[in-house]
Each structure stands twice: as C-alpha cells, then as structure tokens.
Image (cartoon, coloured by chain):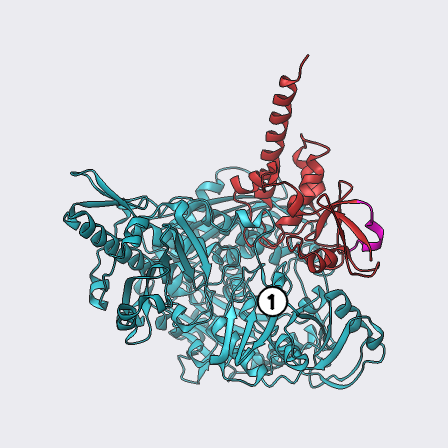
Amino acid sequence: MPTLTINGRSMSVDAANDTPLLWAIREQLQMTGTKFGCGAGLCGACTVHVNGEAVRSCQTMVGDVAGKKITTIEGLSAKGDHPLQKAWIAEQVPQCGYCQSGQIMQAASLLAKNSNPTKEEVVAHMDGNLCRCMTYSRIQKAIMRAATEMRTASAAGNDRRPT
Amino acid sequence: MNQHVKKITPETTDLSRRSFLVGTAATGLVLGYAGVPGVSEALAAAPANFEPSVWYAISPDGLVTVTCGKADMGQHIASTMAQIVCEELGAKWSDMRVNLASNDPKFNDPVLGAQITGGSWSTMMNFDAMSRAGAAGRMALTEGAAASMGVPAGELAVRDSMIVHAKSKKQMSFADVVKSGKATKTFTPDDLKAIKLKTPDQYSMIGVSVPQIDIPSKTNGTAKYGIDVMIPGMAYGAVVTPPVRYGATVKSVDDSDAKKVPGFIKAVILDDKTQTTTGWVVAVANTFANAKKAAAALKVSYDGGPNAKASSESLLAEAKRLQKLDDSGQFFVKDGDPSAAFGTAAKVLEAEYTTSINIHAPMEPMNATAEFKGDILHIYSGNQFATRSGAIAAGAAGIDPKFVVMHQMWLGGGFGRRLDADMMVPAVQAAKAIGKPVKVIYTRENDMTMDFSRPLTYQKVKAGVDGDGKLVALSHDVVSAWPTQRWGIPDFLSPSVDKKGPLDAFTVNGSDFFYTVPNHTVRAIKNEMAHNATPSGQLRSVAPGWTFWAVESMIDEIAVAAGKDPAQYRISLLDGAGKNEGGAQRLRNTLLAAMGLAGYGTKKLPKGEGMGVACVSSQERATASWTACVAHVAVAPSGEVTVKKLTVATDVGTQVHPDNIRAQVEGAALWGLSLAMYEKATLKDGGIEQTNFDGYTPLRMSQMPEVAVAVIANGEKATGVGEPAVTVVAPAIGNAIFNASGARVRALPITAEAVKGAMKA
C-alpha cells in the first residue's frame, strides 16, 4: 500500500502502484478539487504539484510519487488565500470553474519561480490548460495581479528584514 | 416563424394561477409559489411540518437562500437569480446564498413550465417572477416589522436586510422579523400582479457587478460537481461504447480477462428502452481506475447496425440530394414569391454553406451517480433538463418518473451537452444490476465519440437583387439532423407555414432575420440519414450558429456584387419596415456601435489585413439579444488567417450584472472563433474519429485574439447573453477574410487551404 505525502500529511492509499495519482487523490483520499478532464495529459484539469513542479496527475502513477511532496488545490493555501486564489476572485475568473483548480496549480508553479512574468511567459506556461468557457483573458489578468501582490509582499518582507 | 417562442412569452405563464406564499416555518421565512392547492392552509396549521416549495427562504440568522431552478454551468445564473430577488427584497448581498433545485415540479421555470436551461432564456424568463418574489418578501417582512414596532408599515424603509423607522429610530433586521414569527402575509395572484416593482432608476442591485456567489468555491476545490459525488458503499462504472455512434447492438461480451482485474464486479449490457444509447456495456468495479481497466479488458463484439457505413461525406451528399428535391422539408418562412422574383432580378447569386460536426466537450466529462433507496431512485448529476432527464432515468430503471429525485450539482460546463440524459442510463442500470449505488464516469474518449453533437449542416442560399442593388428575393434551404425532434416533446416543435407538419425550429432559428426582403423563404429539411447516424444535440447557440453563417456571409456576397460597403448595405436592409419594426432598428444601432468601437472604415489597413462585419438577432426572433461583430484579420499568402481582434457589441436591454455579461459575451465570442477556426469532428464508418483534445482542438490561450465588448443597456427588457455572440463571429471572420484577400470561404471551420484555394490566382 503506497504512502503518499499530500498537503503536508502522510496518507496511505489502497491502490496499485500503476494507479493514476488523480484517482487515488479523488477516490481514496476524497479530495475532489483535482479534476479529471481527458486522462491523456492534454487539458491540465488534473494539475497538482510534485516537489513543486506542476504535473498532470492523470499521467502520474502512484508508485512513482511515493515519498515525494504532493500539493493539491486543497493544500495550496491554508484558507484559500494564496495570492492566485485571491486574484481569481478579484478578477472573477471562473465560469463553470471545472478547470480552475488545474489552472491555479499550473499558474502557482510559474509564480513560485518567476514572480514577474511577461505576458508571453504566462501564455507559454498556461497553454496546456484548456478552459472550455474560454476565461483565458481573466486568467492572464489574475496571474498578473497575483504576481504583483507577491512582489509587493516580498518587497515589504525585505523591508522588514533587519539590516 | 418559431411558434415555440410564442408559447414561452410571459403572457402565457401560469403564474397567475398560483398563489404566492409567505409565512414563517420552523426553518425560517419561506416564500414561493404554491403548486399544490391547500398548502397555505397546511402552512398555517402546522408550520413546523411545512416543506418549503419555494424560491427562497430566510433563516432566523438572516441568511437568504435562493433556490435556483436553472442549471448553473458557469453563467452564474444562480447568483443572478439571487441578485434579482435581492434587489426587490432589500437584502444585503453578503446575506445571499444559493441552493440548486431538485427536479420537483414546484421548481419549474415559471414561464417554460419545466426545468430546462438553454436558449439564453433564464434571465429573460425569470426576471419578473424573481422580482415579484423578492418584493412580496419585502412587503411581508415590512408588515411583520410594523406590527412588532407598532408603527405604520408605510413609514418603514428597507435596506441592506434592515427595516428602519426613521421617525422613531426603531429598526429590525430581517433576522429579527423572522424570529418574531410575524411575517405571515399571503399574496393572491392579483396581489402579486399588482405589486409595483421598482423602476430602473430605483435599482441599487440590478446593474451592479456584485461578487458572484459561486466563485470562491471554484478557486479552492470545494465546489461540488456531479463527478465529485461520493455515496457510501458506491461502485464505479466505466462504459464501453461501440465503434458506431448509434445503432450498434452487442452480440457478445467476454469478461474472462476483466475478471482478472482486481475489484471488478460485473459487466452490465445496457437494455436501453429509451433508445438514448445503443450497444453500450458498463464495466463495474470498486474504483474508477479498476473499472477502466476492466472496461479495456472486456471483449465485446458488435453488430454495427444500419449506420455503420455512414461518413461525413455520405451525410453531406445526402443533404445535397435532399435540397435539390422540390418537395423536401417544410417552410419556416414564406413571404412573397422568391422564384418569381428571381426571374425578374437584375442579378442572381447562389452559394452553398456548410458546417462540420462539432463536439461540446465540456471540461467535466459526462457522469451520473444512481442510488436506489427504498422506492426512490436518486440521481446525482449536473444536468440542464431535469424534467426530461428524470424521465429517462425512470425509463432506464423501469419505474414511474415521479419516483426519481434528481440532485442538481454545479455543471463543469454545459453548452447544451447536459440537456441530454444518456449518462443516466448506464448509472441506473449498473446500480440496479449490482444492488449498490454506482457512479458512471465517461472517459474523454466516450464523451467525444458519444456526443450529441452539433449536426453537420448544408445550406443553399439564392439571392436576387434589382438594378439598384436592392435585395428583392432570398431563398434559403437548411438541411440538418433535427436535434429537438429527437426529444420527442411536441411542444418544442413548431408548425410549418405550409402546414406540412411540425418542424424543428431549432435548426432554422435566425434565418427569420430582421432584414427587409419582400420575397423570402426558408425551408427546414431534415437529413434523416444524419439524424439517425449522428443523434444531434443543442450546442451553444444552436441553429443561429449555422444559419447566420450562411445569411451573414451571403449578405456580404450580395453587397459586394451590388458594389456597396457590406456594413452600409446591412444598414439599408435594416429599415424596420412592417414586422421588422423595432428589432431592425436595435440591430442597426448595435452594428453601428460595433463599427464605431472597431474603427470600421476609419483607417487604412495594411495589405493582407481586412475587417468584416456581421450582425445577428440570436437566439430566436422573439428572444433576440441584438449582436454585431467586427472582425479584424490578417491573411497570409499561404492562406493562413490570424484573427487580430474581435469587436462585439450587444444590446441586452437591461443588464443585471455588467461584468458577467462581459464574461459571457467574451466567452461566447471565443467559442464562435473556436468553432470558426479550430473545431472539426468527422464521421467515418459510423463513428466519430476524434477521441480527445489532440484530435478535437478547442481554442487555447495562445490562440486568443484581443476581444473588445460593448454592452448596450437601453432599458428594454433583459435578454440573454450566453449564446448570441457565438453566432456572429464566424461570418464576421469570413467576411473579413474576403475583405483582406478576396477569398470567399463557405465552409466551417475555415482552413488555410480553403482560403488559399479561394484566392484569385
């Protein structure tokens, strides 16, 4: 029985090693924020982080991620207040909302490395995530808003640092 | 004309036959329309036992929960209903909550008399009912507060969930009044009708972009969709579908390999008396991953049935054959005599327009969870047509529909796909077969190949102009599968003007446009072969998605032939004569707004670039949101098209939520672009060839052009915005391509090859 470290908690799942992580998360652990969209790595709805990298959980097998640090939308922030989540609300991004967990997780992996992305970098990073409601322009705006907030917060943090 | 629309105008609502209840029950203040006689007496006698049958309830803590009878698939209609109630009720927005209705008929649409969500109808058809519900609640609360305070009700003001008596400085919150039990007023139908609703200048909520109630839950993974339903002890089903879209039968199933899959429970061959599915098998297992493995391990042999040879080519050839027959189809429009007018016209143009099969592909694949509990069949599934889907579920179970409870969920995209109920059948029959609840989830491959697709369409348009370039005659034949006829609900069909029996107006809506053309006919021709081989559905914007492709392309061709500017030519046709009075003028103004915003005709564009216009009265003639688009494109010598900008203007009458309207119009316009340029499904050997997002390719972020939206709110009645902008984009792009390159394209989706091929040598 593989043991997974998800959102900071260690949990054993009753699933074969070749079970897609997506289904272990959704069915075994009943965390349903991560969505099934295509089962082929083509849409991004199932995006989670493994050791900080955005991966498609439908293409990631349980046996391959044992011992690695997995983060889902439920664990992105303690109170749903990651700068991206706040920006998603401020820009009123979601329509049906089904792809948005994956969009947010995909975007979070970009901003973790680059809190000042260009529009082109955002598009390149997000292009694998389909939104059938076509909320793309709001997704872009929200990412830029969150990036600004993260930079501001980080600058404020620097100011407070003792010299 | 579309008779169905006449049926659903507010005048025919049965609202007047119901009484409106206000009363305090154990759970709080409840307000709604009573469908059952005697319920108000029951309420008075035993409030604690009263089950709210209602649009909203106010709990003793002051929270107002609106029950939304419309499917919320991302158009935020639940929030919109709450907003309309909130305006008249006088509640504070942060006190508003939403709840999704079950299929209980008491939650039927007050105008449509059923639970169906589509047609961009919801706001238009519920605005009045929700407003009156809100106002009645405010009056009941005010009277209750007046009694408690001992002041005249007329001296009280309501705002932000507070009822205030300015003179005495006394005040009560909604919560206080509910707790007091003094809100007990009952409204007769006449009382309700007599309520004087606010005028637009008094609005404080309508027209304000309040935060959508559902959005926070869609940023943290807590919003529950059908696919997220978990029932204790449930099993999972994966469907095995035949290689033929419709008409196959299962000859044999060998489950010997499936039995080796851990957790495998059973293979269930569907016996679908509703004829929604054909030749399906469900592999049931303890997890979905195992069910999928078992499904892959099942060896199923099929008889392909009568459609096993059908292809996109054969459906198109059949459409062309049918169109050539004089006695095909039925007339949807028959004004004057185009045949005679063509004889005397100075110039006659003819053109054929086609659209491909298109797939809904909402991001949440189809799914349903079925659970038998005692006599009741519970279905958990996000669905746009609970009234019919409940009946299909009942049919699959072999029980009376009244024993089916549909639990509505948030929809991970609808776009018309979830008007259909195929997913009920495997869930119900698998649950019945194993005696446990079963959640059936389609793989993306199931979802795409078994879509109730937008049908392949073929249209032939013939136009005659006189010596001055005036359009004097237009004949328009529309050949397609008939999606709505498939439902088997006579009310959704319309009588033909030549009295040849009912026709499916949802294949021709839009062709009854607002241009003044003295001789104008539209024939609706059913392509029986396509109807059988590719059971079609309603895809976002439905018929106007193809009829305006033909009409708005042809109008452009006519303008060019007449030597006129295509936009100015349209304006001259929108003269508002006769039956077009009113609508034509609004459409003209909308077109002018789009032209103005896009800078149409004001600047010289570089070589290889061009602008094209289109304007539409989508969705239906009687429910139009006047919408116009200017597309700006660049066309490379290779035929490669880059859409640089889409400028869309839409006249929505009254805007409830401006930001949401913009979101919907932009999303719809991008859908229009996606259908125009990127989405194509094909049929071969009776099966859909595209199985996932590699073969069927909706627009991605990198393909998104700049989109500018202008919303015209002129105080007319609120109209819908979920769909109209879909329909205007393809013809605007086609016309822009012609303007840029001289290449006229007449097939959707538009390909570089077609553009290059159409360029003058």
Snapshot quadrant of residue B698 = bottom right
Task: Give the x, y percent position of residue B446.
Answer: 70, 69
Q: Is residue B162 left or right of residue B462?
A: left
The residue wearing badge 1 is B354
* Residue A155 in the image: above or below residue B362: above
- The spot of residue B164 in percent (x, y) is 23, 42
The tint chain B carries is: cyan
- Residue occupying image coordinates x 65% and y 85%: B271
User: Is residue B312 found left or right of B161 in the rendered image?
Assistant: right
Residue A67 magenta-drawn? yes
Quadrant into which the C terminus of chain B falls: bottom right
Depth check: B507 or B44 in front?
A: B44
Chain that is coloured red in the picture: A
Q: Which residues are magenta?
A: A59-68
Give the amino acid at mark 1: Thr
Instruction: Report how many numbered discs are placed on residues in the image.
Output: 1
Instruction: Return the x and y of residue B434 as percentages of the image width and height.
Output: 68, 79
Q: Taken as a whole, is the magenta stretch helix, strand or loop?
A: loop
